[in-house]
Image (cartoon, grey):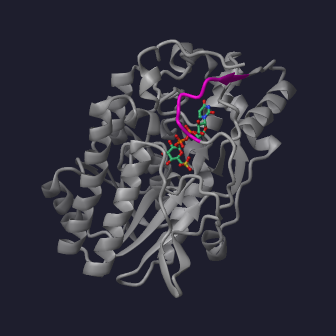
């Protein structure tokens, strides 16, 4: 199948491109290198050095013998999006090409507006370009479990059957996102659902949980194929950050009480979920939602797992409860369904001692590159605390 990966230079986009290419799909990557600019803006960098996308594509050809077309293009520019679709004629588009960080979207007015304009206009341009030049193409869109928030009822996969005043209907599941970033994904979902309903496009919205992991089978083939692994307060996610903190000898930064429960998945499962979605496309006009995670943990449980495993490797790790920089429930009910990808054949890589050990060991190989001053959180959701947010305070 001909698959275009938007955001093909990113943490998930690049490994997805290689994974699909290796399985015989004809893959093109599209990126505007925005993430690399945001890294410069924040003065952060991935733990493991990465090559330019041009060099990655070249290295992939040398290692695998397979070519990948490369589009340097900004999704906000409708002309170049259309041109990419006309030239490559994708049968599926995997859309990772968005600003992916909740803290980034909460830094200030500019970043909040940027996140929503960037994410919404990119997705809208893709939808319009599909309508114009590739109406049969399948849009596989990376959404987030954070669209639902943490309601006090079970979370369904996209839709809920409800009875109201004696009548029944199946409607989009209520959304209660926790940041302007998560909100951008909600707005995207509404736009995609609309485009499927009105124009008979087809799409799978992958409401993904928090991804962890450094390596995939393909990144391990050659150091030039590594993916960008972040651990800073803005682009790093919980478990990835905890592994780096453990290796650096810093306390694990649990925000607040740590009872925040989330869905997690290994980076290898992200790739498999995308593949399963592509090879089992929806009907024309169908908009479907898969909840893409494999297990749930609360943040304190995760920190304790990392602490225990790090101790096996001789690291003395402490857990520190920081005053929560976010506004979120720290104890709550959380029971989201995640059956649809399992039904399609997903066999999860669950978090295990072996897996955690291999992550810690891999981080340790690059310990000399850890920048300690980019780890503590400074971005805060609460405007009353924003003024003195430069100094994070310990809570206990
Ligand atoms: N957290 C800590 N300590 C840390 C970092 C995070 O306690 O050092 C807590 C946060 O307060 C939050 C939870 O861990 O309760 C998850 O935070 P995160 O930074 O790991 O993930 P999040 O901001 O939710 O966003 C990430 C990705 C995003 C994706 C989302 C899926 O950056 O692109 O959409 O995970 S989900 O969380 O299911 O919405």
* Residue 253 falls in image quadrant: top right
- Extreme residue toward the front, this view: 165
Q: In this rendering, is residue 299 above or below 231?
A: below
49 and 213: which is toward the camera: 213
The percent coordinates of residue 385 (x first, y second) are 47, 21
Q: Is residue 95 shown to the viewer in this render?
A: no
Quadrant containing the N terminus is bottom left
The percent coordinates of residue 128 (x first, y second) are 21, 67
Q: Residue at x 67, y 20 (%)?
A: 395
Magenta part of the protein: which range? Answer: 320-328
> Magenta region's main secondary structure?
loop
Q: Residue at x 74, y 33 (%)?
A: 303
The percent coordinates of residue 82 (x first, y second) are 18, 62
Left or right: where does residue 296 sit relative to residue 372? Answer: right
- Extreme residue toward the bottom, this view: 167
Q: Is residue 289 shown to the viewer in this render?
A: yes
Q: Is residue 100 magenta?
A: no
271 and 309: which is toward the camera: 309
* Residue 372 falls in image quadrant: top right
């Amino acid at each position: 199948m001909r698959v275009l990966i938007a955001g093909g230079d990113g943490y998930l986009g690049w490994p997805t491109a290689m994974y699909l290419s290796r399985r015989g799909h004809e893959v093109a990557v599209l990126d505007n290198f925005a993430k690399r600019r945001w890294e410069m803006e924040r003065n952060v960098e991935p733990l493991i050095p990465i090559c330019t996308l041009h060099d990655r594509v070249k290295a992939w050809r040398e290692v695998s013998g397979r070519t990948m077309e490369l589009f340097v293009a900004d999704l906000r520019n409708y002309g170049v999006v259309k041109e990419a679709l006309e030239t490559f004629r994708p049968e599926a588009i995997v859309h990772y090409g968005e600003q992916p960080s909740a803290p980034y979207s909460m830094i200030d007015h500019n970043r909040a507006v940027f996140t929503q304009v960037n994410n919404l206009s990119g997705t809208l341009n893709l939808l319009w370009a599909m309508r114009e030049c590739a109406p049969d193409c399948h849009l596989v869109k990376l959404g987030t479990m954070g669209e639902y928030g943490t309601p006090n009822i079970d979370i369904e996969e996209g839709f809920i059957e409800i009875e109201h005043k004696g009548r029944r209907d199946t409607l989009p599941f209520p959304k209660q996102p926790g940041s302007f970033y998560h909100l951008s994904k909600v707005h995207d979902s509404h736009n995609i659902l609309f485009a499927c309903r009105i124009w008979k496009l087809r799409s799978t919205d992958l409401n993904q949980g928090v991804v962890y992991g450094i390596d995939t089978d393909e990144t391990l083939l050659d150091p030039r194929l590594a993916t960008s692994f972040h651990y800073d307060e803005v682009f790093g996610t919980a478990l990835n950050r905890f592994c780096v903190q453990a290796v650096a000898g810093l306390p694990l930064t649990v925000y607040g009480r740590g009872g925040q429960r989330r869905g997690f998945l290994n980076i290898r499962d992200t790739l498999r979920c995308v593949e399963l979605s592509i090879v089992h496309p929806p009907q024309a006009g169908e908009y479907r939602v898969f909840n893409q995670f494999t297990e749930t943990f609360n943040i304190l449980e995760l920190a304790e797992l990392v602490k225990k495993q790090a101790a096996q490797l001789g690291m003395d790790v402490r857990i520190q409860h920081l005053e929560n920089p976010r506004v979120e429930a720290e104890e709550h009910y959380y029971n989201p369904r995640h059956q649809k990808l399992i039904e399609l054949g997903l066999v999860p890589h669950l978090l295990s001692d072996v897996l955690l050990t291999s992550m810690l060991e891999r981080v340790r190989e690059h310990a000399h590159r850890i920048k300690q001053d980019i780890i503590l959180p400074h971005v805060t959701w609460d405007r009353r605390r924003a003024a003195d947010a430069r100094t994070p305070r310990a809570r206990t």
